[in-house]
Image: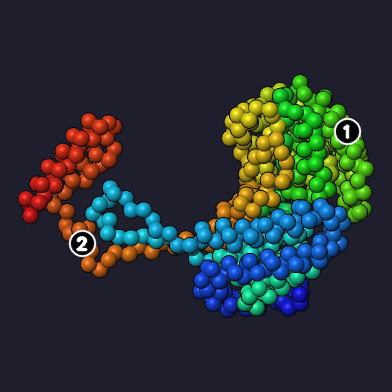
Amino acid sequence: MSDGIRAGEDGGDAGTRCALARAAQGEWSARPLAARVRVIEGAARLLAEEAPRLAALLSEASGQAPAALWSAEILPTLDALRWLARDGARHLAPQSLRRSRLQWYVRATRHTLAWDPFGVVGVITPGNAQLFLSVPQVAAALLAGNGVLWKPAPAGDALAVLAASAFRQAGLPEDLLQVVQGAAEAARSVVEAGVDKLFFTGGSVAGLSLYRLQAERGRPAVLELSGRHVAVVLADADLTMAARGITWGKLSNRGRNCISVQLVLVARPAYADFLARAGNAMTVASASPDLGLSNPGEAARLRRLTEEAVERGARLIFGDGTGPTLLADVAPGMWVVDQEIQGPILTAAPVESEAEAIAWINRGAYRLSASLWSADPVRARHMAARLDVGQVWINDALHPVAQPAVPLVGRGQSGFGASRGLAGLLEMVQPKVTSETPARAARRHYDPIPPNGADLFRETVAVAFASGAKSRLAGLGRLLRTLIGLVRAR
């Protein structure tokens, strides 16, 4: 596959690239939806053929083992493209809206809801899941009829060029998808280029800065920002399963996922037992060579976070922050509790009740996701309904968001709007309603309302909202007499 897609260095020509994408977007959005679907399907097939090369690029950039990348990045990304083509696309088709029987005097008018693209959207994606957090977003934008300025994390530039080339070879207009390369200034240049909607995935500081810039232009954005996943382990939970699942949810991708488990709130009676099992799971996991931190600066940062927590009263159960680490007895106010830490540090604290755990989660600034571990599914569902977070997992961690129909939604400082799934696809379009009245249809609403016309509307309301069959029958009788009176009056 050739790299025949244009890529901008350092975002210096983002304005020009936006103009190119905008010039191509009109013809692209005018194509039938089925034609756009074929391009998404073709790109998925080409990317599947290039999957070994994708795995090599991902492994080189992230340092992760290829097996983990196939299961966590490549397969879910290709699955998401297939879902967009097979299931998501049908939701973009125009649909007729039901007409109300109560407003009988204008029932001749038909209403159709359609979805228009925004024009050119900016998609800025992070380096912690370079394929999965980017390509489905780009594909959804294209399927919806938009042009795209895609600014990947610098480590993902080569992968972005390869993916963009697949879309082009599948039939995408040459200028419709533009890859803008560079660091922070390149991201800013995407917004300054005048994109009609911004989709940002990454840290809250950078995301909010770009959002302010976008808002100054009066244009919308979807922000998928920092996460701080909190797990709650109830006393009736299978503690072995919970310890294994939570540890896995922490250490996958070395704890760099925005939905990595960070804090575990454990019912007091199960606390000591859970810590022992989680410590054992950490011991086993630490033997993996894939969990080391190759970046000395990152290792030093995480060690300082661990030391800060211990100085403020936390107990170090396992590790030192530079690899799998377990901290117990943490409390609000500690950085490892209140902020997203992006690393393999798992923290734990005891709680006395469900209410305490719910309050702890709901008052947190970052409310992207949470998980509940319990042998009682009804209890867990009731508790999930009371959590003010974007997604709740019951007796599992991390993997639900890999399902192509499942959106990722932030709350609080974790952002707003949705990505992926149907909710994410509909973020890529704006609604348009067309209302059509047949030329020969009666237009009673043009005529002056007769003196007793109010009686007709009053009796319509009375019938529609009657509390019982007897009242409804009486109302129908009054409505009929009113109609007869109106006809006679003419």
The front one of 50 and 307 is 50
Point out the image quarter for the C terminus.
bottom left
Give percent across and percent down for residue 165. Answer: 72, 73
Q: Amino acid at mark 1?
A: Asn
Please, what is the three-letter code of the amino acid marked with disc 2? Ala
Location of residue 75 by image quarter: bottom right
For residue 463, above or below residue 298: above
SS class of the residue under badge 2? loop
Mark 1, secondary structure of its residue: helix
Residue 460's tag is none
Which residue is found at the position 93% from the left and 43% from the top?
A: 287
Query: At which x and y percent is residue 332?
Result: 75, 34
Q: Which residue corresponds to mark 2?
A: 442
Q: Residue at x 68, y 65 (%)?
A: 44
Tally the marks. 2
Q: Residues within 10 Å of mark 1 (few under 14, many from 20)?
A: some
